[in-house]
Amino acid sequence: MAGYTRMGLSVALNTKNNAKADVRVAQDKEITKVQELTYELKVKDVMTTDVVTVSPKDTINDLREILRTRRIAGAPVVEGNQLVGIVSIEDLVKCLARGEMDASVEEKMTKKVETLYADEPVIHAVRKFDRYGFGRLPVIERDQGKLVGILTKGDIIEGLFKKLQIDYHEEEIHRYRASHIFEDIVADKTRLHFQYNIVGQDFNRAGEAASGLKKTLLRLGFHPQIVRRVAIATYEAEMNIVIFANGGQISASVQPEYIEIEASDAGPGIPDIEQAMQPGFSTAPEWVQELGFGAGMGLPNIQKCADKMDLTSQVGKGTDLKATIYIKERGN
Amino acid sequence: MTLEEVKEILKAEVITGADTLQMEVKMGCGCDLMSDVLAFIKSDSLLLTGLTNPQVVRTAEIADIAAICFVRGKKPDEETISLAKSKGLPLLMTHLPMFESCGRLYKNGLIGCSEYKE
């Protein structure tokens, strides 16, 4: 576990020693996403495959030119396909100081090379960098020992960022695909049902159902514009129950293709539905109008938000309103 | 237009949400009828209203309204304020009447809902 944590810090965060201790405590019990990725990703996923190599027969002067033009600080030494050593800018500086620029790479290179296998998890590379303090590690194929790439700490960080970005992007797409919950559920027919009880004449609590439904749908990942339409229709229906009836129920049935809201009450009922649907027609008492409602816009508003609306009512029995909003493109 | 600018233009006081004054409002809507607000307002608007009951905050929440400014010096009750706080909705209050509040904001470049193109 300790090694686990140190890796996350020394490579991904590159924190100083003192900060390391603090964060280690906090992270000991929790495996971060970065740590998880260092196990998931293989060295070959993050290494540089276009490797600049030198030959053992090259001189240090040749090496200087290669490092300068390719803007690198070291290179593996390869003979045939085989890795025979590694040489870095440090070796070059030593040769420069001693006036040995004509020496061969073979004489000055490090022969016992620490390497990585292409199929090892990145965490192994992280530990090796930690242990030896090298700037780069050559990557070889497990069977033949053939050089296939080179890895620096920079490559690891870049690789992790790329992977995080890809993962994040996928999550974002997922989040906005409203139907994903249905794809994840295995059943022949799936329907989510949310029910809210509405208290009549209680203006302070009016809107709680619409508010709760809105929050729920957003959390489920439905598109904000779809949620907005559902919320407005629900809110208007809820206000009607609060204003006219002595309470009732609102339910939302969420199906793969559409959301159906049903508002029902055992209130006085609507004598003339056609008239009630006219914008501006209202039978609301004055106190309701003072609160900013009862302007005769409720039902027309619901109709405007919904793709389909069905209103049935019986005087003295109650009212039942169904509003359907399609989840995919409007009118589908 | 930011809420900070709205506050300056209307000489408004901030009731709640002082830390959100850098928030951008895309358009304005002046209305006392909540059903009309629900019917015509678009997301991220500033609502100017003379109504101060909790339903104004509910309406704002349902219709994705960014902030509310109460006109004519009306201050909402505690219930309305605490509901707004719990929803993270900024509330402002100006002593200017509705017509002048709207006029000043419009003159300073805040467009109306019918002019806004998504």
Image: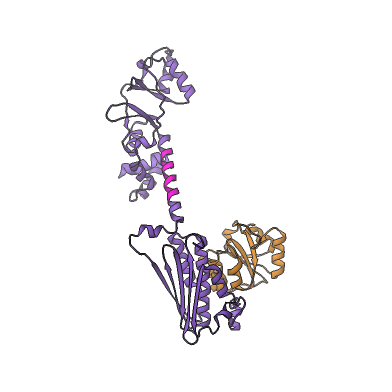
Chain colours: A purple, B orange
Please state the horizontal and vertical placement of residue A190, each as a whole percent of the image: 36, 64
Compared to residue A249, the image places residue A166 above or below, namely: above
Compared to residue B116, the image places residue B71 above or below, namely: below
Closer to the camera, A72 or A224?
A: A224
Q: Is residue B19 magenta?
A: no
- Which residue is situated farthest in the front direction here? A332
Instruction: Classify the position of the N terminus of chain A by image quarter.
Output: top left
Please state the horizontal and vertical placement of residue B62, each as a whole percent of the image: 53, 67
Compared to residue A10, the image places residue A49 above or below, namely: above
Q: Residue at x 53, y 63 (%)?
A: B88
Closer to the camera, A332 or A90?
A: A332
Please state the horizontal and vertical placement of residue A126, each as a whole percent of the image: 35, 37
Compared to residue A168, the image places residue A246 above or below, namely: below
Q: Is residue A137 visible?
A: no
Could you tell whether A247 is left or right of A301 in the image?
A: left
Q: Read off the magenta span.
A: A157-170
Q: Residue at x 59, y 75 (%)?
A: A297
Could you tell whether A279 is left or right of A100 in the image?
A: right
Q: Is residue A165 magenta?
A: yes
Magenta stretch: dominant SS? helix
- Which residue is situated farthest in the left direction here? A143
Closer to the camera, A189 or A199?
A: A189
- Which residue is situated farthest in the bottom direction here? A316
Could you tell whether A312 is left or right of A34 in the image?
A: right
Q: Is residue A324 visible?
A: yes
Please state the horizontal and vertical placement of residue A283, each as a whole percent of the image: 58, 83
Q: Residue at x 43, y 38 (%)?
A: A158
Q: Quadrant of residue B49?
A: bottom right
Q: Quadrant of residue B18?
A: bottom right
